[in-house]
């Protein structure tokens, strides 16, 4: 059976999401565990993520997407093929794909993503900048000159863009994002407790007790690591104010990146943004207090999107349904040779 579908794909630094017919059809970490000698894939996605920091010497964990762009082409291709098969089974599919990339990248990076999508089984492949996809998903009127600011705090990149008339007026893809919160937590625990923790533990601490403003009620979590002197396992308790201390500078680095984009933006567009508020999205924006801190830092009201983890991929799927709007902004659905998944 041949199934032709329209799908949005977000190959994110932390996870890959495939979206079709108004729903998420696959969501898996962008991680592949490979054999250290042959580089053959052993685990994909959830299973691969579980092996992070726990692999024997014979295996290596690879993140093929870094800071929102393809860092390892071969692994990204294998991963996408695997995910397309998981999503569509053995059915022969010829999906039209709208894939997303951070704003302001080179033609070569666009081409590289197109090639990966092509070998993954796509039919017509188009690339859209993430913040523009979010604007599509929000249903913003592209026919009027009005500034809209989108801030997407992902795992490996923070994408900031001012959109007007369906195009990107000013943008920046900034390499400080939610992974940096994890890294700061690892550093803090090592310094304050002499305990080494893994990235997954740091992520759990961030999600459960992290904060970038003072929490109304202090919370704490017990976690495990390895004492750096004895090498033995050790538990410790960490509170939300300690995590705040560890990560608030990184939060301000992100806020400052937004301010820098505003400084490069036409004053009339800034006036629109100040009046409407900026749109905040991305999994990294879910940390407790991010909207509040960003509003305080920029002096602009912040509207948190309802589906921060899916807004980009959902917007990409919406954009695919509205090619006429994309044509207005110099996007074209490029027809690439038809492929099938074997
Ligand atoms: N409730 C939460 N609180 C804090 N952080 C969270 C929460 N949920 C997810 N995150 C963080 O959000 C990040 C993932 O966000 P997202 O899915 O937007 O990233 P991505 O699209 O894969 O990355 P990028 O856009 O940088 O390529 C991870 O670092 C994760 O730890
Ligand atoms: Mg993202």
Image (spheres, rainbow, N blue to C red):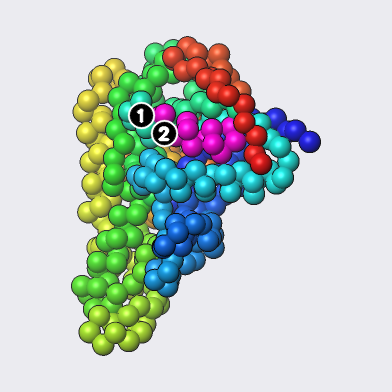
- CA neighbours of label 1 inside 10 A, class few (<14), some (14 to 19), many (20+): few
Q: CA distance from mark 2 to mark 1?
A: 6 Å
Q: Main secondary structure of the magenta part?
A: helix
Q: Is residue 154 visible?
A: no
Q: Are marks 2 and 1 in contact (CB under 8 Å)?
A: yes
For residue 61, say whether it is visible.
Answer: yes
Asked whether mark 2 and ligand 1 are closer than 8 Å, the reply comes as no
Q: Is residue 117 left or right of residue 217?
A: right
Report helix, strand or loop for mark 2: helix
Residue 113 in the magenta stretch? The answer is yes
Q: Position of residue 324 (x, y in %)?
A: 55, 13
Q: Residue furthest front?
A: 38
**For mark 1, what is the residue?**
108
Residue 256 is drawn in which quadrant?
top left
The residue that disc 2 covers is 112
- Residues in magenta, as a range: 110-122
């Amino acid at each position: 059976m041949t199934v032709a579908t329209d799908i949005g794909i977000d190959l994110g630094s932390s996870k890959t999401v495939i979206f079709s017919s108004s729903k998420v059809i696959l969501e898996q970490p962008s991680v592949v565990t490979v054999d250290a000698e042959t580089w053959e894939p052993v685990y994909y996605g959830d299973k691969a993520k579980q092996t992070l920091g726990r692999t024997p010497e014979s295996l290596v964990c690879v993140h093929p997407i870094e800071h929102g762009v393809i860092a390892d082409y071969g692994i990204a291709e294998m991963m996408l093929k695997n995910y397309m098969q998981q999503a569509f089974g053995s059915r022969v599919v010829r999906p039209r794909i709208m894939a997303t990339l951070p704003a302001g990248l080179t033609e070569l990076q666009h081409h590289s993503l197109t090639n990966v999508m092509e070998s993954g089984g796509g039919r017509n492949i188009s690339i859209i900048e993430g913040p523009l996809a979010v604007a599509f998903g929000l249903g913003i009127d592209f026919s009027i000159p009005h500034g809209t600011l989108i801030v997407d705090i992902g795992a490996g990149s923070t994408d900031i863009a001012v959109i007007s008339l369906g195009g990107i007026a000013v943008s920046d893809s900034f390499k400080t994002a939610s992974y940096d919160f994890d890294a700061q937590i690892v550093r803090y625990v090592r310094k304050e407790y002499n305990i080494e923790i893994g990235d997954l533990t740091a992520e759990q601490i961030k999600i459960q007790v992290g904060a970038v403003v003072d929490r109304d009620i202090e919370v704490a979590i017990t976690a495990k690591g390895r004492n750096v002197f004895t090498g033995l396992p050790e538990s410790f308790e960490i509170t939300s104010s300690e995590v705040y201390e560890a990560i608030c500078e990184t939060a301000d680095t992100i806020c400052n990146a937004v301010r820098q984009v505003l400084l490069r933006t036409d004053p009339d567009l800034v006036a629109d943004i100040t009046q409407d508020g900026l749109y905040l999205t991305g999994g990294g924006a879910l940390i407790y207090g991010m909207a509040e801190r960003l509003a305080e830092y920029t002096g602009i009201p912040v509207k948190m999107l309802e589906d921060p983890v899916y807004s980009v991929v959902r917007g990409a799927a919406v954009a695919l349904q509205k090619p006429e709007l994309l044509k207005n902004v110099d996007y074209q659905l490029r027809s690439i040779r038809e492929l099938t998944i074997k």
